[in-house]
Amino acid sequence: MTTTLGARLQLRARVYALIRQFFAERQVLEVETPILSAAGNTDPNIESFSTTFRGHVDAGSRERWMRTSPEYPLKRLLAAGAGDCYELGRVFRNGEAGGRHNPEFTMLEWYRIGWDHHRLMEETIALVEAALALVGRRVEVWVEGYRQLFIDELGIDPIHASIDVLRAPLAEYNIDPVGLTRDDWLDLLITHRLQPMFPSDRITVIHDYPASQCALARIRPGDPPLAERFELYLGRYELANGYHELNDAAEQRRRFERDNEVRRGRGQQEIPMDEHLLRALDAMPDCAGVALGIERLLMCLAGTDAIADVLAFPFAEA
């Protein structure tokens, strides 16, 4: 599909207006946080842009990182008592350019105090349904636990299956196994075997991930322990990733350190940890948060597989 410049600009503007109305009605505050930070995202699977500040040394660290999401400063606002809040703004990820990716894109991220990930799932579904209504679409909603999804669709228990069992359904793709962990194989099963089969007229929500895939989520004790996390797909596109948020600074520091250990093992640059966040995290109230990719949503609304169709200017023309 090819859209006119006017059509793509109008669609984005309508979605922005919808988002702001949606949260105004729910008394969720719109905020704005820094794009440049002295700390970066330690996630080994995400690469950040960095730049050098050339002003007076009293301003702090000269190396500054462009945010890959507004998550850390939003959590600092929560710890300071800002209450339910959201940000709609640009984020940046290095190396992610192509037909469906742009190195700079727009992210909507919001937090709800006193909520868990299940309650936030419902609100995220409601927002996506409202966006679909802008273009006259309605879809069904299907919610499933991560473990049950693997059992039902692949006949594999993702918690207990060996790596060889996880690799078997991916044999046709000739994936180089060097350096791949159990969680890498689980992710590949989703992206290669499960996600492509999600119907285009369905919102699919997967929740309660293996504890090893906790990222910034709480882990719920049990047999097995589970990460209180969800992902929302519209058709085969992943739109949103949400958590019942971890507010344990010591545990978060351990996760950041583990990320950098993985980075060292892969020969990647270590990323400075966000000490501002770590100092604030123990004071952050119990909450759930979610990030939603606006371009992915716009692509679904416009019926296109090309991210260029929903951008004013794609990366090659920026």
Image: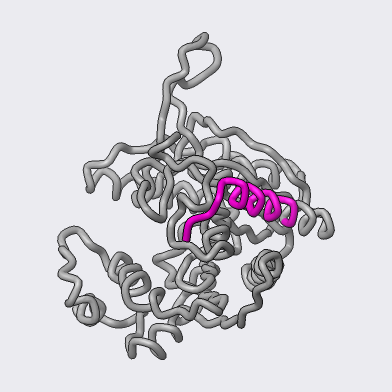
Foreground residue among 293 and 283: 293
Total marks shown come to: 0
Q: Residue at x 19, y 78 (%)?
A: 164
Where is 129 relative to 42, above or below?
A: below
Quadrant housing residue 112? bottom right
Where is 69 relative to 58, above or below?
A: below
Q: Please give left or right for residue 1 compared with residue 45 in the image.
A: right
Per the image, is 141 magenta?
no
Q: Residue at x 39, y 66 (%)?
A: 212
Would residue 91 be visible to someone looking at this image?
yes
Image x and y of residue 117, in percent: 62, 68
Foreground residue among 24 and 45: 24
Image x and y of residue 59, in percent: 55, 16
Q: Please give left or right for residue 20 compared with residue 186 in the image.
A: right
Q: Residue at x 15, y 70 (%)?
A: 174
Q: Quadrant of the C terminus?
A: top left
Image x and y of residue 191, in percent: 36, 69
Image x and y of residue 249, in percent: 55, 48
Q: Residue at x 40, y 44 (%)?
A: 42
Per the image, is 3 magenta?
yes
Range of the magenta residues?
Answer: 1-18
Foreground residue among 132 and 107: 132
Where is 57 relative to 221, above or below?
A: above
Foreground residue among 150 and 255: 150
Rendering colour mode: one colour
The secondary structure making up most of the magenta span is helix
Would residue 116 be visible to someone looking at this image?
no
